[in-house]
Image (cartoon, helix red, strand yellow):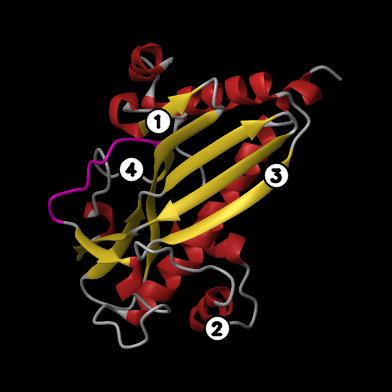
Amino acid sequence: MKKLFLICICLSVSLAGFCQSTNATALEISADLNKETYQDRAKKYLMTYKLNDNGEMEIVSYLQVRESKEVMYNNIINWIISNCTEAATAILYENEEEGRITARCYFGKIANDGKNVPSEWVDIRPILSVDVMDQEAIMKFTLPGFEVIKRDDNSATRGFMGNITGFRFTGDETPREAQFWPMSLCAPYKDDTKFNKNTCYRAYVHAIECYKILKQQVLNTGYSSAQASR
């Protein structure tokens, strides 16, 4: 087990390296709705992305990679280290012999309806689990719901550790003023939701984009050594 070692390493990494282009604007571009509305796209995704028995959105992907189990495992660990703040709570499980790593992610300010006052800004903390084998990996993305903070001023909206957007692996540090919207009670899963439907639709579509980004990152770790050796 490497968890204690990872805790020491992660805590020494600069926060400046964690943020990626996963804010609301970047995810809107990535979603590329064209003539669709967010409601249209959300209802289309509803046919593919289901809830598990706990009411969480759960997506499982089977990936083909070039690396051996050992190399892939180490690549995943290195990726977590380079994008980590609080390993003590971010890394939920890791076992090299089993080839399994489970960590909590954070994506800040992924969505905002933009029409309401105060504005509703959404953060998510999905759980990423990766089982690695020789030239294969099984990735599971689990999202229990949305963290929603209402603010009159965009610049005053706070996420994890202050006014920070982007992606990182982190602990379960939900701001006190945040509301938690369970996935099973949000549109499109619950049509008569008590929450703002427009915010739900945007957050849902953008959460799928976050999943796609994570999937590509996991794939990248399965090819990084091969690319570096060319």
Q: Secondary structure at mark 2?
A: helix
In the rendered image, residue 30, in percent from the top left (x then y), is placed at 60, 60
Q: Which mark is residue 40?
A: 2
Query: Label 4's element?
Result: loop
Q: Nearer the viewer, mark 4 or mark 3?
A: 3
| 129 lies above or below 38 | above
Label 1 with label 2: CB-CB less than 8 Å: no
Q: Label 4, on which residue?
A: 164
SS class, disc 3 = strand
Report if residue 79 lies within the magenta region: no
Residue 36 occupies quadrant: bottom right
Quadrant showing the C terminus: top right
Graded by Cα atoms within 10 Å as few (under 14), some (14 to 19) or many (20 or more), the crowding at tag 3 reads some
Image height check: is 157 above or below 189? Answer: above
Q: Position of residue 204 (x, y in %)?
A: 45, 68
- Left/right placement of residue 88 relative to residue 229 reads left
The amino acid type found where label 2 is placed reads Asp
Q: Amino acid at mark 3?
A: Leu
Image quadrant for the N terminus? top left
**Residue carrying label 3:** 63
